[in-house]
Structures are given as C-alpha cells and as structure tokens.
Image (cartoon, rainbow, N blue to C red):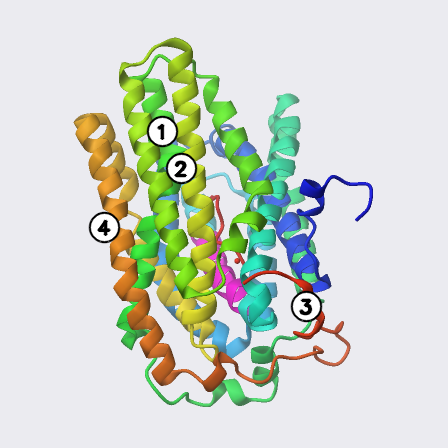
Amino acid sequence: MPGLPRFLTRLIPPTPMSRKLAGNSIVFASGEGTFLTISAVFLTMVVGLSPGQVGVALTLGGIAEFLVAYPSGRVVDVVGPKRMWALTALGQGIGFAALPFIDSFVGYICVAIWFAAMEGSGSAARNAYVLDVLPSTERVETQAYMYSSLNIGFTAGAGLGLLALAFDSTTLLRWVPIFTAGMMVLNAWRIARLPQAPHDLRVAAGEARVKHTGPGPMRNIGWMATSFFNGTMWTNQVLLHTVIPLWLVVSTDAPHWLLAWLFATNTVLCIFLPPYTAKFVRDLRTAMQMVWVSTAFFFVSCLITMATHSTVGLITVLLVWLGHVTVTGAELFISASSWSFQAELMDPRRRGEYQGVQDVFGALGSRWAPAAFTFLAMEWGNQGWLVIGGIIVLAAIGLGPSTRAAKRFADEHFPAGGALVPEPSAGAAGAEPLESPATAAGIAADPVAPDERRSR
C-alpha cells in the first residue's frame, strides 16, 4: 500500500480472507474492550455488587467454562465451526444486552455462566474455522494478524470506555453494554457472511454425523500433554497482568503511574510484532525453537524483575519496564508456536473436539499460576523468581517429547495429507471465493485465531 511506512503496511493482512478475519477480531475486541474498561465501575456502582461477589461470580464462570470446554468442542464438530461461531457471537450479544437489567448477585452469576459457556464454545468454533478454511501455508501468519487486530480493537475499546467513564454518569454506564451487544451482533453478521469451510460443507452434506473411525483426542496422550505444557508456557500472562504489577507496588520504589506505561508498551508491541515473530515458525521443528526463545525471554524477565528489589530511582523504573518488555517477548514467541501446534497436531475431522481437549488441559496447566506465582514472588523473593523461571523451563522441556508423541499419533491416525478434502478454491454457493494455495504463494509463512488475551 503506497504512501505508508513499511512497518505500518505489515499490519495489513495480505489476503482477502485474512483481512476479513482480522476485521472480525477488531469488531469483537472493540466491543468487548469497551465493556472491560468500565466493568469494575459497572459491576460495583451500577449493579451494586461487592468486589467479593464479583470475584465469586467470575470464579463460577471460570468453572463453567472449564466444564463445557470438551462437550462444546464436540458440538462444534456436529454443528459446523462457522455456524457455531456465529451463534456464540450472537449469544454474547444477548448476554451484554441483558447486563443493564441485572440488579442482583444471583442475576450476575447467571450472566457470568452464560458468558463462560458462549466464550468457551465460541473459542473452539473460531479456532476450528480458521484452521479449516485457510490453506496450511497461511494459518500461522493469519492468526498473527488476528492477534495484532485484537490488540488494535482492545485499544480502541479502552478509549471508548475511558470516554464513557469521563462523564461520571451511572446512567450512561448502565447502557454501555448495549453498545457492546451491538458490536457482538455485528460480529455474528460478519461471521455469517464468511465462506463455508470444508467441515461446514461436510455438515451440510450430513457427513459430520458419521461416526469417525480411530481414536479421539482423549486417547491422544501427546496432545493432552502438549496442551498442558503449552498452558503452563502461557502463564507469561500472569506475570504481565498480576505478578509484575504487584511486585512493582509492594517490593520496589517505582512510581505507580509506571503501570499504565507497562500495559501500553505491551499493547503496542502486541499490535506491531506478531506478524514478524510468526515468520520464524514454519513447522513443528521451528515452533519448538521458538518455544525455547520464549523460555529465554521469560527467564530473563524473572532475573531482571528480581533485581529491582534492591535498586532505586530511575534504575528501578528502567529495569521494571525492561522486565515487562522481555515477558512480552515470551508471549509473542509462544503465540506463534501455539498456533503451529494447533495447525499440525489437531485431527482436521475433529478440530472442535481437539480444541475442547486443549482448553481443558491448558486450564489444568495454567489456572494454578496466579496464586502460586504471587506466593513465590512475594513470599520467597529471589528464590521464588528463580522457581517461577524454572517452572517454565520444565514446561519447555516437557513440550519436546509431548509434541513428538502427538506427531506420531497424527501420522498414524489422521487423514493422509492432513486435510479433509483438497483445499478449496471457492466457498459454498453465494459465498465469496477463497484464495487457492497458488494465489497465496506470495505469502511467507507458516498463527485467536488467537486465544483471547483478555478475560471478563
């Protein structure tokens, strides 16, 4: 695109399909980001909940999301990923539309559980659709663009949320979720207009209800272990959003305004860099190389942040910021590796089911981290930071044999060539044409859809 600096043109997805998917990410994140920015004020001042009640409701929602992850993945395979993605986006819109009318703890628990079910099912459907609809050479790079677009959307949503907060009006805040609901409905409409993926076509033909031969993901030990260790690698988010901010406030002399600068830095880096870091991942071998790059960034972040306990003034500020930058590097490189694992180690006939299993075992590998990492850093000090880094090193070590086992399982039980059907050059009747692999030959690459980086 002439007239724009090269680093900005790299933010524009190179194919029509990748641009559509990135656009969906911006629409979704703009709506959700708006509500997330005002959510604490909305729940306490508008709904009238105490902080403890909010925590209980979100915990129950997290339990519900965990419980529905596997069965909802199986439903995706039966219903079709595009249809399920659109339905869950519409379901999220219904949930947001209900929020202005919630005025009790029990009512919010019901909405929180509804959101958890919609988000769990929607994540499985979205990831299954993206992997299914794209040629194999585009999957990792397209997911990187979607990841960047999510951050663009969340940034825009944060701006809108701050604007709403600036009016200091509970009446205005009460109706902000209606805007988010409208964005979710728009997202559902955009999804419905996307081309049919191969699995959607099989559902329409009645083939998806045919019982698959061969073992499913619950018998794929390599995939379950890969999901577990990958979930542990993703605890970089706990450092980013919980442990380093708490450490800054409790254990350093850094000014509290630095927190805003840290989050802004992370957001900007995650807008501009994913398309670049994804270039390093072309197959499972390079994905594992990037796992170790991510591990190195994570461990260095632990060492740098640990040192800030005994520094003062500007040195502390610079080191805390550098620790945040390096853990962002850990996030970027494990992102690209995670997308490669999904693309190469999921059975293309059962991507929804595989996504559900990934969500279950990923949660087992990560949900303990906020309590454990906070305790280690705050109570054990330097030794605690070394243990946190050591946990990530062990997870990276575990990913080696687990991905090899999952690859052996795939070679033995998945369809030859790893595809349901020859990759399509057109969608269903009435849908806009998909690009063929030949058309996409100019795209370098071998990344929800990114996993959502924010949670309600």
Residue to which mark 1 is pinned: 244
What is the distance, in whole Å, between disc 2 and disc 4 at their CAs?
17 Å
Inspect the image, locate mark 3, and give the three-letter code of the amino acid beneath it. Answer: Ala
Q: Is residue 308 above or below residue 242?
A: above
> Looking at the image, is mark 1 or mark 3 earlier in the sequence?
1
Q: Which residue corresponds to the image point at 29% horizontal and 22% vertical from the top-left?
A: 307
Q: Quadrant of residue 170?
A: top right
Inspect the image, locate mark 2, and give the three-letter code of the amino acid beneath it. Answer: Val
Q: Is residue 174 above or below residue 24?
A: above
In front of the other: 139 or 198: 139
Query: Of the residues tagged 1 and 3, which is closer to the observer?
Result: 3
Residue to which mark 3 is pinned: 440
Q: Look at the magenta stretch and give its main secondary structure.
A: helix
Tell me whether the residue at label 1 lies in contact with that at label 3, contact meaning CB atoms closer than 8 angstroms. Answer: no
Query: Of the residues tagged 4 and 1, which is closer to the observer?
Result: 4
- The range drawn in magenta is 113-129
What is the distance, in whole Å, between disc 3 and disc 2 at their CAs?
33 Å
Number of other residues with Cα within 10 Å of mark 3, as a class: few under 14, some 14 to 19, many 20 or more: some
Number of other residues with Cα within 10 Å of mark 4, as a class: few under 14, some 14 to 19, many 20 or more: some
> Looking at the image, is mark 4 or mark 1 earlier in the sequence?
1
Tell me whether the residue at label 1 lies in contact with that at label 2, contact meaning CB atoms closer than 8 angstroms. Answer: yes
Res. 135 visible in picture? yes
Q: Position of residue 197 (x, y in %)?
A: 61, 75
Is 397 left or right of 176, judged from the image as shown? Answer: left
Q: Position of residue 98 (x, y in %)?
A: 57, 48
Residue to which mark 2 is pinned: 327
Report if residue 79 lies within the magenta region: no
Q: Position of residue 187 (x, y in %)?
A: 66, 56
Q: Quadrant of residue 215?
A: bottom left
Residue to which mark 4 is pinned: 394
